[in-house]
Image (tube, rainbow, N blue to C red):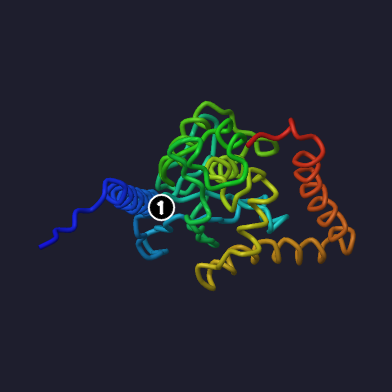
Amino acid sequence: MLIHTPSTSSLFTGRLAAMDISSTTLGMGRKRIRHVLWPLDEIDPKNSKFPCCLVWCPLPVVSWLTPFFGHVGICREDGVILDFSGSYLINVDDFAFGAVARYYQLDRTKCCFPPHLAGHTCSCRYRHADNGTSITWDDALYSSQCHFEHHTYNIFTCNCYSFVANCLNRVCYGGSMGWNMVSVAALVLIKGHWVDGFSVLRSFLPCITVLCLGLAMTGWHFLIALLSFSFLVFGWFVFGTYCAKNLLKW
């Protein structure tokens, strides 16, 4: 009777194949673990919980004249709102100027959470690493919070939009490191959702009232002045963002 004994080369080849399969499986497992995201709770406007959202509300006086300009914040994974509302001050779960009127939920799968330089999923890994990275959403917000607790507040140069832009750049949201005041405002105003009908009324009724009173008292000159003021405010932030890049902070 002949007994077949596998050759040394075939045993070696089999072990290599097994090692390849094991390493591939382990690599896939690590990749899955790295990208697992904690499930979020439902958005709950009654309790002011907006997980991973940008939130917006009108500003007193300012929004009466320019309704597109308001106060913005960003939320942790548990829905708690963080907003930069004063020098060396980050509000936590206490939105500075009233209830949220408009929100936009961000997609964490569009963020880059690299455990190391080779783990970047964005195309600007070196710039991202220089700017500051984070391994989770809440870690990014906490890092930006610590950073802005050493900043003075200025509505024209370093404001709530600066804080939110810093958070989005820290996670390289959407593969972009170019978030700024203008892009943050455009995102929440264009893609955002109103909380309810009262939020729409609260945002625009004061401006409509001021406009009607102004037209009744001074005529069309008031409308021209109001539009000029809005244009100057918008022009300032566009100029400061894209023309004088060291003027505004984020």
Residue 192, given in percent of the width and then of the height, sits at 58, 64
Query: Which quadrant of the figure contains the N terminus?
Result: bottom left
Residue 147, given in percent of the width and then of the height, sits at 51, 30
Residue in the picture at 60% in, 33% down: 153
> Which sits in the foreground, 239 or 90?
239
> Which sits in the foreground, 112 or 146?
112
Residue 243, given in percent of the width and then of the height, sits at 82, 38
Query: Which quadrant of the figure contains the C terminus?
Result: top right
Residue bearing mark 1: 35
Residue 93, given in percent of the width and then of the height, sits at 40, 47
In-image side of 95 versus 57 (left or right): left
Residue in the picture at 65% in, 65% down: 204
Q: Amino acid at mark 1?
A: His
Q: Is residue 205 above or below residue 161?
A: below
Disc 1: CA contacts within 10 A as few (<14), some (14-19) or many (>=20): few
> Which sits in the foreground, 160 or 106?
106
Q: How many marks?
A: 1
> Which sits in the foreground, 173 or 225?
173
Residue in the picture at 70% in, 35% down: 248
Q: Quadrant of residue 165?
A: top right
